[in-house]
Amino acid sequence: MGRLFGTDGARGVANSELTCELAMNIGKAAAMVLTDSSSTHPKILIGKDTRISSDMLENSLIAGLCSVGADVVVLGVVPTPTVAYLVKKYDADAGVMISASHNPYEFNGIKIFSGDGYKLPDALENEIEAVVLDGIKPYPCPTHDGIGSVTYAETAVDDYIEHIKSSIPYSLSGMKIAFDCSNGSASRTAERLFSELGIDCVMLNDTPNGKNINDKCGSTHLEKLSDYVKAHDDIDAGIAFDGDADRCLAVDENGEILDGDFIMTICAIDMRSRGVLSKDTVVGTVMANMGVNRFCTDNNIKFVSTDVGDRYVLETMLHDGYNLGGEQSGHVIFLDHSTTGDGQLTAAQLLSIVSRRDSKLSYIRHVMKKYPQVLLNVKVSAEGRERFKTDPEIAAKIENVKNALGNKGRILVRPSGTEPLVRVMLEGEILNEIEQLAQETADLIAKNLK
């Protein structure tokens, strides 16, 4: 992992860790690294989520980009996948999304997409970091007509909505769905998109004020959505997005949660039945529930596992020619339609399956059996996170847990890519057993890495 960029862009507390100066320099460096030096005015798109700090960082990025000669196209508040899609549609050289995804409002981040709409590989992020942090190249400083300009894309939301609608060539009328927009980017797009697909929409948490993004709502806080659906018999399902709408989780009509593993398996079996699941393969991460592996084995579908992070899922998909992959957290990539995880595309695909089968989500979810899983997030110091891999007592504890579980479960312990946390995940057949082992491991990590 680089010095600026984690598993999903540069991220930190806005105006403290992610300062205006840093954002401006990231913009300068990105323009230098990602654009053709022969282009006098490379074109860079900028989108943002609803955080109070997004306007501040947007202006800093614009200043940095224009100062090195790039022309900026401002998209306004849009989902992250909107930037990824429009970079290619608008023939831009790169795109930038200002968002800290599912994190609280005080955090913000900068995600960068290349001209083909894909998140940057490690090598390019490292090159940008070297320009920003090591000064390996001086920033150009054009004057006169060499300075970049700023324009505003008035049709950005229209173009994105039409793109998602094109992936569902029939009406989804007859369904009543509750949508939790997490007071984030989906607040600008979801109601119109799904209404135009024919759905009777009930909108929740779609009034952002700059400080309520992800606040006890959205894909990381499904309790209220679940309770709402259970309390209203006429609701067929609930859909929850995160702050920048690149994730999607769901609840069925009984309020039972469907995470990304359920959504992927439902989509996989449907795509294979229609002959469109490339190489009969699903790509997931090491965090995928054991049930995904069992599902794939039972249905003659190959499961390919990667490191945590949708960028690694995507790299494998592109390298080996697969078209469906994702994460338990709700990042699902439909490579036939998008170059990145897209929560609203995922929701549209999932709901289309329910509609076509004239069934209920509670029935369709039974394609996969989810095994008990415990995930604990342990707060550690920044130094402690770095010491994690070399602590012998923690390594011994993890090995002991592996031996105790045998072939009936597994343990995965890893530092977060975006926060000062170490994540402890256990799966097994007996919930009480894995809860105890997970807590023992978490307590030791908290003690040793504080």
Image (cartoon, grey):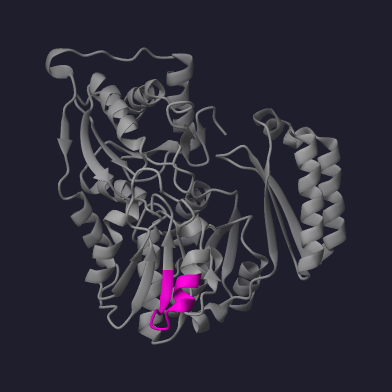
> Is residue 38 positioned above or below 361 on the image?
above
Provide residue 265's location: percent of width, then percent of height.
Answer: 53, 71
Q: What residue occupies the far bottom of the structure in this picture? A: 358
Provide residue 215's location: percent of width, then percent of height.
Answer: 46, 51
Residue at image location 25% in from the left, 48% down from the top: 86
> Is residue 203 positioned above or below 417 on the image?
below
User: Is any atom of residue 296 visible in this view?
Assistant: yes
Q: How many marks?
A: 0
Q: Which residues are magenta?
A: 227-238
Provide residue 188's location: percent of width, then percent of height.
Answer: 27, 54
Foreground residue, 44 or 213? 213
Residue at image location 53% in from the left, 78% down from the top: 365
Q: Is residue 229 magenta?
A: yes
Name the quadrant containing residue 14. top left
Q: Is residue 403 left or right of residue 369?
A: right
User: Is any atom of residue 276 visible in this view?
Assistant: no
Provide residue 247's location: percent of width, then percent of height.
Answer: 44, 56
Foreground residue, 175 or 335? 175
Residue at image location 15% in from the left, 46% down from the top: 154
Q: What residue occupies the far left of the structure in this picture? A: 145
Q: Is residue 313 magenta?
A: no
Name the quadrant containing residue 189. bottom left
